[in-house]
Image (cartoon, rainbow, N blue to C red):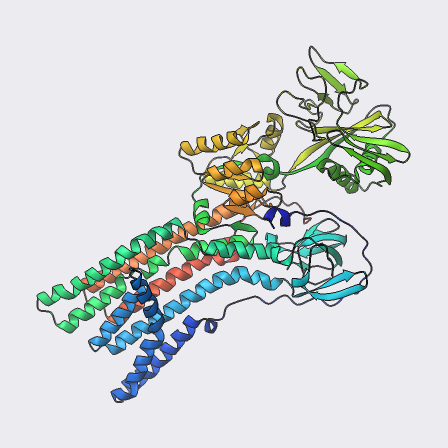
Amino acid sequence: MSLHVFLYGARVSTTLTPVRVPAPAHPAPSRRTRLVALPEARWALASTTAFLLALALDLGGLPWWAYGPLYALAYAAGGWEPALEGLRALRERSLDVDLLMIVAALGAAAIGQVLDGALLIVIFATSGALEALATARTADSVRGLLDLAPTTATRVTDNGEETVPTSELTVGDVLLIRPGERIGADGRVLDGASEADQATITGEPLPVAKGPGDEVFAGTLNGTGALRVRVERDPADSVIARIVTLVEDASRTKAPTQLFIEKIEQRYAVGIVAATLAVFGVPLLFGAELTDALLRAMTFMIVASPCAVVLATMPPLLSAIANAGRHGVLVKSAVAMERLGEVDAVALDKTGTLTEGAPEVSAVRPLPGSGLTPDDLLALAAAAELASEHPLGRAVVRAARERGLRIADARDFAAVPGSGVTAVVEGRVIGVGRPGDRSDLALSPAGPDRALWDAGPDGGLLDAGPDFARMDAGPDSGLMDAGPGRGLLDAGPGRGEAGATVVLVTGDGVPLGTLALTDRLRPHAPAATAALTALTGTAPVLLTGDNARAAARVAEATGLVDVRADLLPEDKVDAVRELQDAGRKVLFVGDGVNDAPALAAAHSGIAMGKAGSDLALETADAVVVRDELATVPAVVRLSRAARRLVLQNLVIAGTFITGLVLWDLLGHLPLPLGVAGHEGSTVLVGLNGLRLLRESAWRPGRVPSQGTRG
């Protein structure tokens, strides 16, 4: 099932019966890998224990046979796994730096430095255990979301209620969610009123009000009311499960920086071996003791190994991917996460990106002589549209419900593609649709080659545009066609909304009035564009296939200056390439099929996931699950933080290696101190990368308060 399908559902309703209210459920336990659960940690513990026992017996003056086997056990427990992996790599003609550590430890033992070699093995094994723990905790941060989803749910059937495992739920099942319970599946509210804590999915800090028609997510916590929810997605396709899958897939990829490091790692390792032989052989030529020369060479091999460099890149990027996933942004790969932080220009689609991509009623205009108030006209239109599945019809019904209007029963509903709908409402045939080529409408000339339809003193004038004396809905759409030269609806300054879609409401064939509909701006669009401007230093570019007036209206509301309208898909690609030819690294944000080419052409692409097309979702580098536009600058900011940590890690690793190598070559670096410095830098780099798992690393920025309604 595609992300588009499972993120977008239909609206249904029924009646909620009284239910008993149990005590609130306990929060789901968090999933956190224990150190002893990792095999690397258990082997490291065994090695450390054997080493400490051997050290105590050694310092106590006991004979070799008493503590020697314990030292051997420390070598075996801590070194067998990296030695085996190193030999496997060697068979594939690859020199693993882990193998260098084992060779150094065995070399120390060969010259009588058994204690120093065992200490190297212990610290090396402990470092490996900590690295394994860091990797496991990165995965825990996302997979732990699965623990939020309850294992059972209350399913409502014709025979009453039954408790079933959530894994057995299917699309269409109706669930009863009591106060304090966690929601068992993604779905849509049929009846009831409550609020849901869905911070785990959307990152919203406050509970979101839920009522009929609202979407709910598996694992989110229901508040004080009871809800009846229709399951709309299979549990395996829930938002939580999808986040986990995509983040785990992303964890298997490697960023360009990591690939570059791995490319030079082999040459570097071979260079270390050559340099180690030189560090050993040259002093011997000048009369140095064999033991001293070999010990210095072993120390050099240890401190020059690039373990910390190899670990510098992936922990920050994987931590950033996990954090973004927790907040509903699915970054598809480590490559994509690294590239997001490189962008210095942004191009935005309009419909479905800056706007919600769904019409809303912006004006209701009864005609003089109709005898109707605006509420009367809207109620009649809503009654006729109640059975319609057209976005325009749903918007009319939603507007009537938001005003609390009574929607009368209708019969004999009929829909005519390209024209609209008709239904019998309270004894009259009510039609809602395109004005069409109506000769009986009161047209009054407004100059040569122009015609205005006067909707009344307060009603705004609908301008059909030069050489076009009627309003054309366009084929198969039921919407006003505002394309170039084909009937922009102009209400004039202060008298309406530019770029609006207008439909005519008739009663028994007589015009009663008009409804104007516009595409609603996303609540956080102005704040998001401002944040992107601050991040890149230049305001985003608006690229849209819509007409210039509609684009200008959105641009004015969001503070955008560079607006390019009436674009075909190839025009959007050309605009993106124009910016990139000027030396910019462009982030394109869109949602439709027509945006897919631009998403592919841009340096990075982000798709709006809720209503985005399957092609756009497949093409984009990242997907915003809940269409929260404020997450776009947040994930760019997070990527930049990851890139800074990668750079910090490389500096830390390089500083330690350089300092320890110079100390060993120019002075006398004790082997235990060299081991501690080398492995300590590796652990430090790993832990530094995990800082991006913290909640504070996600900073969506300040956005205007829009209430808690989802």
Q: Nearer the viewer, residue 415 or 294?
A: 415
Q: Residue at x 54, y 61 (%)?
A: 143
Q: Nearer the viewer, residue 104 or 178?
A: 104
| Drawn side of residue 237 relative to residue 37, left or right | right
Picture quadrant of residue 125:
bottom left
In the image, residue 373 above or below residue 463: below
Picture quadrant of residue 83:
bottom left
| Drawn side of residue 153 relative to residue 698, left or right | right
User: Residue 97 at what x, y percent from top left?
Assistant: 30, 63
Picture quadrant of residue 355:
top right
* Residue furthest front in the image: 91
| Drawn side of residue 624 relative to residue 40, left or right | right
* Residue furthest right in the image: 427
User: Residue 70 at what x, y percent from top left?
Assistant: 32, 83
Q: Nearer the viewer, residue 119 or 217?
A: 217
Q: Residue at x 45, y 56 (%)?
A: 252
* Residue furthest top in the image: 448
Q: Nearer the viewer, residue 701 or 183?
A: 183
How many callouts does the rendering have? Answer: 0
User: Residue 18 at what x, y percent from top left?
Assistant: 82, 60
Q: Does the rendering let one see residue 247?
A: yes
Q: Does the rendering let one see residue 200?
A: no
User: Residue 211 at what x, y percent from top left?
Assistant: 74, 51
Q: Residue at x 51, y 55 (%)?
A: 247
